[in-house]
């Protein structure tokens, strides 16, 4: 499971990738046209991931995705959530 954040400038950032899903619960009643479904997804994260997720959750604009077959992000520039550009050694 991955968490993606879209900043106000339209730049999408992968906040955490490859997270283990520990639990999924839903209030889904099974009826069509019922109340909007709410889900709770419990993810295993480390300290750094928990801090990035907290920032994204505070903003409220995130997407959970399951992506397979993607190339490794090793060496990709970090994009800070507050919009600060990446260091000069990482060209955009």
Image (cartoon, rainbow, N blue to C red):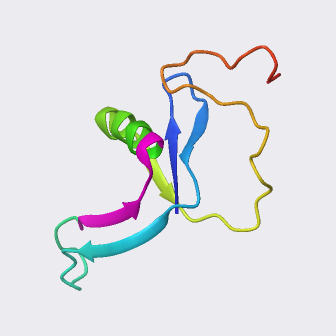
**Number of disc labels:** 0
Q: Is residue 67 magenta?
A: no
Relative to 72, residue 60 above or below: above
* Residue 84 appears left or right of 72: left
Residue visible at 58% across and 54% down in the picture: 17
Residue visible at 33% across and 41% down in the picture: 57
Q: Quadrant of residue 67?
A: bottom right
Q: In front: 68, or 61?
A: 68
Residue closest to the far bottom: 30
Residue closest to the far front: 47
Relative to 56, residue 44 above or below: below
Residue visible at 16% across and 68% down in the picture: 35
* Residue 76 appears left or right of 55: right
Residue 32 percent coordinates (x, y):
25, 80
Q: Quadrant of residue 92?
A: top right
Q: Is residue 45 magenta?
A: yes
Relative to 28, residue 80 above or below: above
Residue 34 percent coordinates (x, y):
18, 73
Residue 51 percent coordinates (x, y):
39, 37
Residue 78 percent coordinates (x, y):
65, 30
Q: In front: 89, or 41?
A: 89
Q: Quadrant of residue 30?
A: bottom left
Q: Which residues are magenta?
A: 37-48
* Residue 34 appears left or right of 92: left
């Amino acid at each position: 499971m991955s968490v993606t954040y879209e900043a106000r400038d339209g730049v999408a950032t992968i906040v955490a990738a490859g997270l283990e899903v520990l639990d999924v619960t839903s209030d889904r009643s099974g009826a069509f046209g019922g109340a909007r479904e709410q889900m709770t997804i419990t993810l295993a994260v480390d300290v750094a991931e928990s801090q990035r997720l907290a920032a994204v959750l505070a903003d409220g604009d995130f997407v959970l995705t399951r992506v397979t077959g993607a190339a490794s992000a090793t060496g990709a520039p970090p994009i800070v959530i507050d919009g600060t550009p990446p260091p000069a050694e990482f060209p955009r």
